[in-house]
Image (cartoon, grey):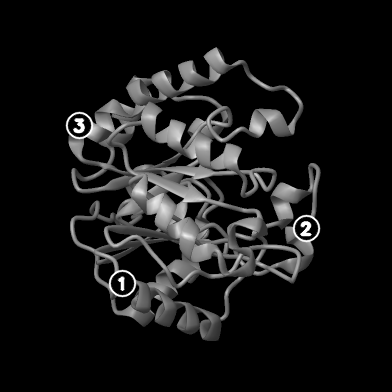
Amino acid sequence: MITIGLTTFSDHPALIDGASRKVRLTEYSGHFPIVELDTPFYALPTVETVKGWQQQVPAEFQFILKANRLMTLHDQVVGEPATGGERQQMFKDYRKMIAPLVAAGQLTGVLFQFPPSFRRRVESFNYLQRIRHWLPEVPILVELRDPSWYANGIGVDVVQLVNELGMSLVVVDEPHTANLGVPLLELTNPELTMVRLHGRNLAGWAKTGKEARSVRTLYDYSTEELGQLAQAIQNLAEHSKQVVVIFNNNAGHAAAGNALTLQKILNLHFDNLSPTQLDLF
């Protein structure tokens, strides 16, 4: 099974005929059956907020939530490291926050997008084990952004380790050179595979600072590129029960259009969507 969604639900004007306002979750869920939300990365939403999301979508609708910055060690990157107790408490609070989604079967997974500083070393493997201990029985999706994880043909070992922990290694499409970025993996988890499409803006990908957020994912996939990705996704689907494709190339609002085009190429039809309404005024 292949499903397609986008990062966030509010920032996709193509879904509302280009209107200059935020897209409502009820509108988004009329087009796609799953969404990735980064809200918890910055601050955990309340349980009431999570329940509010659920009330706006069909019962079959799925969520992928980003792990909080303390959970992915981003606090260390900015030089404000949390204590061990603070980090463990965040995991406890996170489990409470996702409880309504878990109970309803609406949590496809928690996405751990690690910073490039999370390199392949013993400490990193140990931390992945602690994550599984702190989030037992929760689907965990791991995006590794440093090339060291894939150097010298060791990608197979990494995939095996992640699978043994009951996690899924994210398949990433992003700009890369010999020293930047990670490859598009052909290996996968047999139960669940997530594909995140960041675009291929090489010049923007290396940006840092305040400007980085607005240019890193500034990219519009061509029809030819989407056709090539469609073939790779179909190959993954032959070896994985569920493949979830998330478009994250939204700096220029291209994600929604690209996703709808990929859906057509793959000839996918999504059931149990929210009803779409005609704008009569």
| Residue 268 locus on image (x, y percent) | 28, 73
Q: Earlier in the sequence, mark 3 or mark 1?
A: 3
Dot 2 amino acid type: Ala
The amino acid on which the numbered mark 3 sits, given as a three-letter code, is Ala
> Which residue is at a point 73% across and 59% down the rendered structure image?
205
Q: Sort mark 3 into few (<14), some (14-19) or many (20+) by Cα contacts within 10 Å.
A: few
Provide the residue designation for mark 1.
237
| Separation (CA) of disc 3 from disc 2 | 40 Å
Q: Where residue 72 appears, x then y in whole percent?
A: 56, 35
179 vs 231, left or right, is right
* Badge 1 amino acid: Ala
What element does badge 1 sit on?
helix
Q: Nearer the viewer, mark 3 or mark 1?
A: 1
Quarter of the view holding residue 107: top left
Question: Which of the two discs, 3 and 2, labels the residue nearer the N terminus?
Answer: 3
In the picture shown, does residue 52 fall above or below 192? above
The CA distance from mark 2 to mark 1 is: 31 Å
Mark 3–mark 2 CB contact (< 8 Å): no
In this view, 223 is above or below 51: below
- Residue at screen point 45% across, 73% down: 186
Where is mark 2, residue-wise?
A: 206
Q: Is residue 112 placed above or below 170 in the rendered structure?
A: above
